[in-house]
Amino acid sequence: MKFQWRPEHKAQIKKKIHNKASHRLSKMFRDAKITRKCPYWIGDFIWNRLLEHWNSPSYHNKCAIAQKNRALEKLIFARDLASLLMKGLGEHM
C-alpha cells in the first residue's frame, strides 16, 4: 500500500511520524529497562552496555534528581491551581 499527500503537508507529516516513532521507541526501552528482558532487536553487546548504564551511580543520581523535579512541579502546579481557585471564589463572595 502506498500513501500520498500534498507536498505542502510533507513537513508536518514527517514531524508527526518522527514524534510517534520516538515515543514508541522510548516506551520499548522503558519496558526493557523495567523488565530487564532483552528485546529481540537489541544485540547482546548493546544490551550489556544499556545494563551498565542503567546500573551506574550517575544514572541513578540523574533519575533521583528528575524524580524530585517532577514532584516539585506537581506541588507548584497544585499551589498555583489553589491560588487561582481561591482568587476565582473570592470574586464571587
Image (cartoon, rainbow, N blue to C red):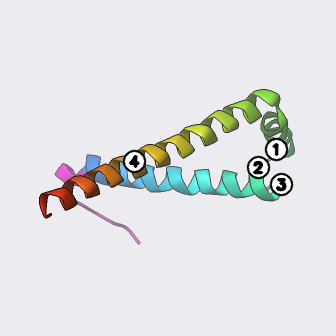
Q: CA distance from mark 1 to mark 4?
A: 42 Å
Q: Given this view, does label 4 or label 3 mark the residue nearer the observer?
A: 4
Q: CA distance from mark 2 to mark 3?
A: 12 Å
Q: Residues within 10 Å of mark 1 (few under 14, many from 20)?
A: some
Expressed as whole percent of the image width and height from the top left, the position of residue 34 reads: 76, 55
Q: Which residue is mark 1?
A: 47
Q: Earlier in the sequence, mark 4 or mark 3?
A: 3
Side of 42 relative to 14 (left or right): right
- Residue 11 located within the stretch drawn in magenta: no
Q: Which residue is mark 4?
A: 79
Query: What amino acid does circle 3 point to?
Result: Arg
- Residue 6 located within the stretch drawn in magenta: yes
> Residue at image x 68%, y 51%?
29
Tags 1 and 4 touching, CB below 8 Å: no
> Could you tell me which quadrant the N terminus lies in?
bottom left
Expressed as whole percent of the image width and height from the top left, the position of residue 10 reads: 26, 50
Q: Tell me the SS state at disc 4.
A: helix
Asked if residue 85 shows in the view, the reply is yes
State the extent of the magenta-drawn residues as a range.
1-9
> Residue at image x 48%, y 46%?
75
Q: Earlier in the sequence, mark 3 or mark 1?
A: 3
> Could you tell me which quadrant the C terminus lies in?
bottom left
Q: Nearer the viewer, residue 54 or 87?
A: 87
Q: Which residue is mark 3?
A: 36
Q: Tell me the SS state at disc 2.
A: loop
Q: Given this view, does label 3 or label 1 mark the residue nearer the observer?
A: 3
Asked if residue 40 shows in the view, the reply is no
- The main secondary structure of the magenta stretch is loop
Query: What amino acid does circle 2 point to?
Result: Ile
